[in-house]
Image (cartoon, rainbow, N blue to C red):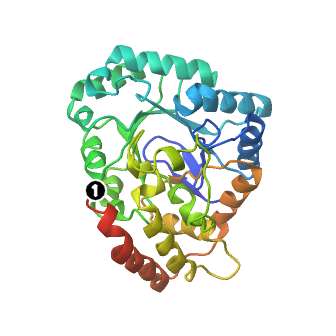
């Protein structure tokens, strides 16, 4: 595993971390035992960054992480969680200091710690980024010792650019993968200039870029790839990176030809993300130990040649960009 500096936080993390959405819920039947096994396999492989949220399984993900880390002992990885999506309705006015502190207190209990390494606003409404009082509230909570750092998880590049105007924002989590290439333009430049950490999420486009999904793949009723296919429950960009399913499958077949011999498409897709120096850590999820081990192995792939990178950009521009580039 390689390591990268996590912005200006003082943390150094492995370039591949563990995304803990799957072990919380909304990915079909992932048992608690499988979730624990996946996390243990990731940590055994050397990963030092875990990303979760208070709404993943209504706290199940955070509690599994707490139990696994307690059982393992030793040096703790960096654990990032998120706050805000528990609001109902999920509106900008809900992002008050009282509500945020309540969410943070709950995560402190779930994770069994006195201070959170990193708390991220969880894809809040756009208006939140234009309310300085929200970020002032986070500063006050930080001063109280409940959080060490705060950042944001965003849907759109424009939100990311606005967020990093606040000097206390140390990290931005954003969708970045072969199917979502826009962040590599202005945002990555600005993040690097301000020494803001970048967490790349949805790296495999909800499994499309694993190369294992076909037209006939069936998803469970409680899998977001079934119930959020058209954005019925949350932003459609979180499911298949917002790419229409059939278009995604077509693009996958063209990308498959670019994968080097001996590598999986999933590993290639993760290594593609790490070609961007601005990315601090990429957080693929895992439903079981085998997937976690495979994710970790992607870090050892050699750099992708520039002609292959250009070929992936051409596929993106021709097939995918018309659906996603100007939307997110």
Q: Is residue 156 left or right of residue 153?
A: left
Which quarter of the figure is the N terminus placed in? bottom right
Q: Is residue 144 visible?
A: no
Report x, y in % for residue 227.
Answer: 50, 44
Q: Secondary structure at mark 1?
A: loop
Residue under the image location 28 percent in, 45 percent down: 159
Residue under the image location 25 percent in, 36 percent down: 129
Residue under the image location 70 percent in, 55 percent down: 291
Q: Is residue 26 visible?
A: yes
**185 and 156: which is toward the camera:** 156
Report x, y in % for residue 195.
Answer: 37, 50
Does 242 sit above or below residue 78? below
**235 and 38: which is toward the camera:** 235
Q: Is residue 93 left or right of residue 217?
A: left
Give the total number of marks visible in the rendering.
1
Q: Which residue is mark 1?
A: 327
Report x, y in % for residue 63.
Answer: 65, 26
Report x, y in % for residue 248.
Answer: 46, 67
Q: Quadrant of residue 150?
A: top left
Which quarter of the figure is the C terminus placed in? bottom left
Q: Is residue 294 left or right of residue 285?
A: right
Does 198 sit above or below residue 75? below
């Amino acid at each position: 595993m390689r390591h990268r500096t996590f912005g200006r936080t003082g943390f150094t993390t492995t370039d591949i971390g563990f995304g803990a959405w799957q072990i919380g819920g909304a990915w079909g039947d992932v048992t608690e035992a499988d979730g624990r096994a996946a996390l243990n396999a990731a940590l055994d492989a050397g990963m030092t960054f875990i990303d979760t949220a208070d709404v993943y399984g209504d706290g199940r993900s955070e509690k599994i992480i707490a139990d696994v880390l307690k059982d393992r002992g030793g040096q703790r990885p960096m654990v990032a969680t998120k706050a805000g999506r528990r609001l109902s309705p999920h509106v900008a006015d809900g992002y008050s200091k009282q509500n945020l502190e309540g969410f943070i207190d709950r995560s402190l209990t779930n994770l069994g710690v006195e201070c959170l390494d990193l708390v991220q606003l969880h894809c809040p409404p756009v208006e939140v980024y234009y309310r300085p009082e929200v970020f002032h509230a986070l500063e006050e909570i930080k001063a109280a010792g409940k959080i060490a750092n705060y950042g944001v998880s965003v849907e759109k590049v424009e939100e990311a650019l606005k967020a990093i105007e606040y000097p206390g924002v140390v990290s931005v989590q954003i969708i970045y993968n072969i199917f979502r290439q826009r962040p590599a333009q202005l945002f990555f430049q600005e993040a690097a200039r301000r020494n803001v950490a970048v967490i790349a999420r949805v790296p495999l486009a909800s499994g499309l870029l694993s190369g294992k999904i076909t037209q006939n793949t069936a998803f469970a009723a409680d899998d977001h790839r079934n119930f959020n296919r058209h954005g019925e429950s949350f932003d459609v960009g979180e499911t298949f990176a917002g790419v229409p399913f059939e278009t995604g499958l077509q693009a996958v077949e063209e990308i498959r030809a670019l994968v080097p011999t001996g590598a999986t498409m999933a590993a290639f897709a993760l290594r593609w993300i790490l070609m961007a120096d601005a990315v601090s850590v990429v957080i693929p999820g895992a439903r079981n130990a085998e997937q976690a081990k495979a994710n970790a192995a992607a870090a050892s792939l050699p750099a992708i040649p520039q002609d292959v990178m250009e070929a992936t950009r051409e596929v993106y521009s021709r097939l995918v960009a018309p659906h996603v580039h100007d939307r997110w």
